[in-house]
Image (cartoon, rainbow, N blue to C red):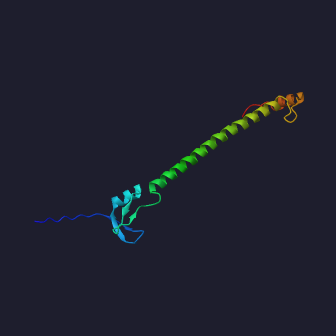
Amino acid sequence: MSAVINVQTALRPISCYQCGTVFGVESGFYSDRLNDKGRFFCPNGHGQHFVGKTEAERLQEQLAKERSRVAFYKRESESQKRSRAAIKGQLTKTRNRIANGVCPCCNRSFADLQRHMSTKHPDYAVGE
């Protein structure tokens, strides 16, 4: 007595780079070779393997680039914050000197300027 077994499998067509023979390989085998770049043979014995980057490798590279870009902008943001704080400090220092009657150009002190600033603009030296 003989038994008949029917097996269905999905094949992926591949064309041999050397002889041009089209042959089919099982989908799991195809994806394994695509990922591990392992060697396989066409029916005529020509060895071959997949070249290039896999989708996972391309996505990893893209992720690395994006992380690098985010890190760059984060560093730039921190630098801008420090720069803004330094400029604000210098501005406050200059405003206080003017309010105390010191000329910002020649660093001379003028009593009239100090009196004018304290009577007419009392809130000028107050930090913002």
Point out the residue furthest to the left here.
1
Which x, y percent locates residue 79? Answer: 66, 40
Instruction: Identify the image quadrant of residue 39.
Output: bottom left
Please identify the quadrant where the N terminus is shown: bottom left
Instruction: Identify the image quadrant of residue 122.
Output: top right
Which x, y percent locates residue 102? Answer: 85, 30
Please identify the quadrant where the C terminus is shown: top right
Instruction: Identify the image quadrant of residue 127.
Output: top right
**Is residue 12 depicted above or below 111 in this figure?**
below
Q: Nearer the viewer, residue 1 or 73?
A: 1
Q: Identify the residue at horizontal 21%, vertical 65% (top origin).
A: 6
Which x, y percent locates residue 35? Answer: 41, 56
Q: Is residue 119 visible?
A: yes
Which x, y percent locates residue 45? Answer: 35, 66
Left or right of 52, for residue 7: left
Q: Identify the residue at horizontal 40%, vertical 58% (top origin).
A: 34
Left or right of 55, for residue 43: left
Q: Is residue 124 visible?
A: no
Count of picture labels: 0
Left or right of 83, for residue 50: left
Q: Identify the residue at horizontal 34%, vertical 69% (top origin).
A: 44
**Is residue 50 depicted above or below 123 in this figure?**
below
Q: Nearer the viewer, residue 3 or 50?
A: 50
